[in-house]
């Protein structure tokens, strides 16, 4: 009996270990994480590039001032990284960050507040000839100061609800001030940070190797001995690499079919993590082309879509799923479904919605069988299935749509010229934050990436107000108003379906949590392998 | 002969110049440029036109076309291909990095193809309309019908499902680790070599059939010469000439044309570099690669012409 009790205790202990969440288990040190990366960046400079192809293999070499909580599945919570803590002045105009001591660069030198200031100056106030692709995200910042080695003070021109999120950008690598002073573009071709891994090699077109940084400031981390990122463009090759156990994980996403195949082939050896994805395909209307200058026509086009049925069908074959507004569902500022479903095109009764669409088209003088061209980007997933689905939906309200697929790299050049009538557009964020996610929809004189070519001062005003709101509730209310005006009243743009991120990975991989952004959680300091 | 060689070498210059002009203009006709590809690929909603103009200026894309062309050609004359517009690295380095893999793969595929195509073609011709001939024909027609990348996918799936094994994903030079090197490259070499062999086998069979019906072969047989001797000394030398042309041109193609096969096997070769160069609108890199492939074709053609004279004494060049 006593023996049986011991056996039962052991078995239940083992079962408990399996059941416990990954971050609650005791991490194991050692091993090399291998992962394919579907894209390769042009340079190593995070301040300049904007592809995940830079983040996945190169983020482990760096730290940022703040980071997004690696265990928060909503991917919205800034937590300390190089900054140990921070305070905000009552007027919301001064942020004071306490910088950690004992942080070393990979060359052995100490990292101080001076390095943080130099890095952020490069991002926010780049000197002439230095490219910073995210400068526009910090328009509220007046100055970045480093009064002493452990303090950084950021002063704002006006309060900003998104500053902390912006400072958690995975691209805002902390560089060494002395290097930047000598050669501001040095980091385009060189790597030297404070991150958990040190750079070993990058064979162009092939792979990047990193090894554990022994002097990493977060003692005990990283758990891995190293990592190997392998550049692999072909998605079938990526799936084969995971299936053949040559790679542990691909951090971007696989398709539903790939997930099912991997699960069928490997069973328990595969763990699947899924999340709504902070990427969405939008449909833009060229407001300078008739009849799309008429909001009744735009409203009819969004009313024609049965997003709820579309979600069920398309999520089986494409990387889209959730019916959403301007924020990723499940994140703090997302509109609750009962409120969202009141907007045009989100109604749960498709017959009523399409009847209204037909009525509006008739009222606007658009005849039955009216033809227009829908321009789509030549990327198979998910542009193609979504495009085909929408064309079918529009046909159901008596519209005749020609599908014009334009080669991917040439796409935005064509759209920007203003020749397209109705077109697919794209939005993808590194963190779910209204300031970043809604910037796209500002008037074309404020944001040249608004290819709808409209000006809406009311919408701009709502955007500014929500960013400067004094409370979360006030901000939420303003975001709802923005969303209603954008998607329901004016229908300047329309949302299709939120992308859906699917990461099937080896069950040996622990300490990694999926978030809505494929740009997050790639520092790899918390990741470990069970064997 | 020396005069002929010199003439052929000089004739390469206008050909390459024509290729250079053509590719330079064609690339610029295609919409978009490298700056657009770099900053607009993932949405680019925070990008300013000002930043893009700065980047274009850095790359010299703001200069008139003729200035860009002259600068490029002047570099070529000095054997300086310039910098990749995408990575900023010297193009010679980018190519050097991938050349070893592409060359080895082309050599392996050509060897497999040649070693199979010549004996199979001869055998099919000798055993015309027997089951041997039919078997060889089925083998070669299947090879022609199956794209090599598709065969590659089948090979990968087969290895994965049956042996639960995949070839290594990163290239290791032959002199560093021959086993890893061969374990990675043998499969694409087989996939490509099979198709390539199919072309060669068909060609070998038909030319051999033609030669075997020639008067001098009949005479040799009437004289009572051994069939083996007739084949090796008289028939093969004449029948192999068109096969040589096909194999050589295929070899030149393999250096930069294995785009999809390289993707399927995740090989970091010139074919992938080519496609990426075009997709990223990396003008300087694509121009250099086109010139490289054009040069490879010209050199191979030239070598084949010289080999013709050596194999067939009746051929004399002036």
Image (tube, rainbow, N blue to C red):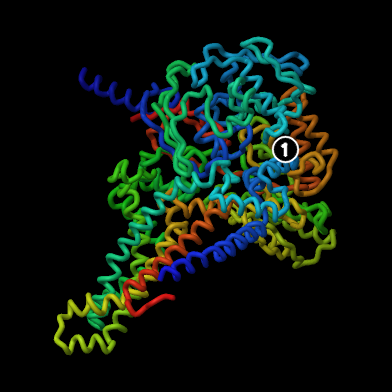
Residue A468, located in which quarter of the rendered image?
top right
Whether A462 is drawn above or below B302: the answer is above
Instruction: Name the residue rendered at 63%, 35% in the picture.
Output: A48
Q: Nearer the viewer, residue B72 or B87?
A: B72
Quadrant housing residue B27: bottom right
Q: Position of residue B248 (x, y in %)?
A: 39, 66
Instruction: Say which residue appears at 74% left-offset and 18% top-offset.
Output: A155
Residue closest to the far front: B3
**Element assignment for label 1:** helix
Residue B102, image x and y in percent? 41, 53
Q: What residue is rendered at 55% in x and 27% in y?
A: A72
The picture places residue A366, in percent across and down from the top left corner, at 81, 63
Q: Image height check: is A55 above or below B118?
A: above
Question: Relative to B59, is B246 on the left or the right?
Answer: left
Residue identified by numbered label 1: A438
Task: Note whether residue A313 is visible.
Answer: no
Q: Which of A175/A493 is in front?
A: A175
Chain bearing mark 1 = A
Q: Is residue A198 visible?
A: yes
The image quadrant where one finds the N terminus of chain A is top left
């Amino acid at each position: 009996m006593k023996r049986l009790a011991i056996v039962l205790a052991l078995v239940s202990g083992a079962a408990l270990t399996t059941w416990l969440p990954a971050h609650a288990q005791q991490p194991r040190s050692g091993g090399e994480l291998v992962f394919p990366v579907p894209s390769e960046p042009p340079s190593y400079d995070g301040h300049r590039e904007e592809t995940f192809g830079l983040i996945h293999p190169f983020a482990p070499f760096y730290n940022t001032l703040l980071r997004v909580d690696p265990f928060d599945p909503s991917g919205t919570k800034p937590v300390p990284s190089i900054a140990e803590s921070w305070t905000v002045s009552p007027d919301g105009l001064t942020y004071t960050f306490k910088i950690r001591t004992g942080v070393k660069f990979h060359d052995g030198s100490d990292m101080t507040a001076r390095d943080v200031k130099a890095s952020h100056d490069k991002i926010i106030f780049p000197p002439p000839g230095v490219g910073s692709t995210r400068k526009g995200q910090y328009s509220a910042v007046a100055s970045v100061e480093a009064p002493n080695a452990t303090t950084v003070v950021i002063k704002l021109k006006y309060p900003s609800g998104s500053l902390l999120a912006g400072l958690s950008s995975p691209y805002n690598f902390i560089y060494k001030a002395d290097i930047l002073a000598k050669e501001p573009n040095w980091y385009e071709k060189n790597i030297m940070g404070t991150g958990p891994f040190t750079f070993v090699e990058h064979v162009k077109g092939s792979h990047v190797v990193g090894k554990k940084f022994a002097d990493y400031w977060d003692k005990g981390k990283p758990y891995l001995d190293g990592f190997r990122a392998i550049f692999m463009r072909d998605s079938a090759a990526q799936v084969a690499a995971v299936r053949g156990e040559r790679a542990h994980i691909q951090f971007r996403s696989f398709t539903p079919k790939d997930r099912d195949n991997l699960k069928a082939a490997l069973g328990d050896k595969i763990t699947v993590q899924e999340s709504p994805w902070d990427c969405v395909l939008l449909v833009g209307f060229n407001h300078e082309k008739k009849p799309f200058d008429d909001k009744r026509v735009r409203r009819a086009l969004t009313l024609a879509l049965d997003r709820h049925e579309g979600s069920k069908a398309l999520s089986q074959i494409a990387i889209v799923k959730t019916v959403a507004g301007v924020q990723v569902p499940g994140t703090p500022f997302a509109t609750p479904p009962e409120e969202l479903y009141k907007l045009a095109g989100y109604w749960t009764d498709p017959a009523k919605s399409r009847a209204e669409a037909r009525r509006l088209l008739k009222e606007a003088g658009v005849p039955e069988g009216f033809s227009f061209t829908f321009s789509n980007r030549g990327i198979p997933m998910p542009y193609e299935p979504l495009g085909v689905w929408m064309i079918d939906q529009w046909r159901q309200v008596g519209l005749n749509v020609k599908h014009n697929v334009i080669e991917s790299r040439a796409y935005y050049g064509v759209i920007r010229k203003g020749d397209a009538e109705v077109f697919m557009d794209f939005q993808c964020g590194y963190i779910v934050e209204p300031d970043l996610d809604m910037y796209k929809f500002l008037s074309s004189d404020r944001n040249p990436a608004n290819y709808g070519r409209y000006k809406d001062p009311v919408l701009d005003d709502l955007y500014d107000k929500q960013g400067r709101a004094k409370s979360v509730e006030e901000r939420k209310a303003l975001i709802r108003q923005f969303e209603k005006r954008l998607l329901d009243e004016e229908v300047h743009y329309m949302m299709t379906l939120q992308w859906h991120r699917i990461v099937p990975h080896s069950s040996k991989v622990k300490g990694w949590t999926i978030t809505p952004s494929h740009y997050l959680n790639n520092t790899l300091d918390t990741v470990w392998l069970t064997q | 002969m020396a005069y002929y060689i010199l003439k052929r070498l000089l004739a390469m210059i206008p050909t390459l110049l024509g290729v250079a002009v053509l590719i330079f203009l064609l690339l610029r006709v295609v919409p978009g440029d490298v700056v657009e590809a770099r900053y607009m690929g993932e949405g680019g909603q925070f990008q300013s036109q000002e930043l893009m103009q700065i980047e274009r200026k850095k790359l010299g894309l703001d200069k008139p076309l003729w200035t860009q062309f002259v600068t490029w050609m002047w570099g070529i004359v000095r054997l300086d291909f310039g910098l990749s517009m995408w990575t900023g690295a010297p193009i010679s380095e980018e190519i050097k990095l991938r050349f070893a893999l592409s060359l080895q793969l082309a050599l392996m595929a050509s060897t497999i193809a040649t070693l199979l195509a010549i004996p199979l073609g001869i055998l099919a011709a000798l055993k015309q309309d027997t089951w041997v001939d039919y078997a060889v024909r089925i083998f070669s027609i299947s090879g022609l019908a199956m794209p090599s990348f598709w065969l590659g996918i089948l090979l990968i799936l087969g290895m994965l499902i049956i042996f639960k094994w995949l070839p290594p994903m990163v290239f290791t030079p032959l002199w560093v680790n021959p086993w890893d090197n061969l374990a990675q490259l043998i499969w694409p070499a087989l996939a490509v070599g099979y198709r390539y062999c199919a072309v060669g086998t068909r060609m070998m069979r038909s030319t051999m059939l033609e030669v075997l019906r020639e008067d001098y072969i009949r005479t040799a047989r009437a004289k009572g010469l051994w069939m083996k001797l007739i084949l090796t000394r008289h028939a093969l030398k004449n029948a192999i000439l068109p096969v040589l042309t096909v194999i050589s041109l295929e070899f030149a193609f393999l250096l930069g044309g294995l785009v999809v096969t390289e993707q399927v096997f995740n090989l970091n070769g010139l074919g992938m570099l080519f496609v990426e160069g075009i997709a990223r609108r990396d003008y300087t890199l694509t121009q250099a690669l086109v010139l490289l492939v054009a040069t490879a074709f010209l050199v191979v053609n030239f070598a084949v012409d010289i080999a013709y004279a050596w194999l067939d004494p009746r051929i004399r060049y002036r």
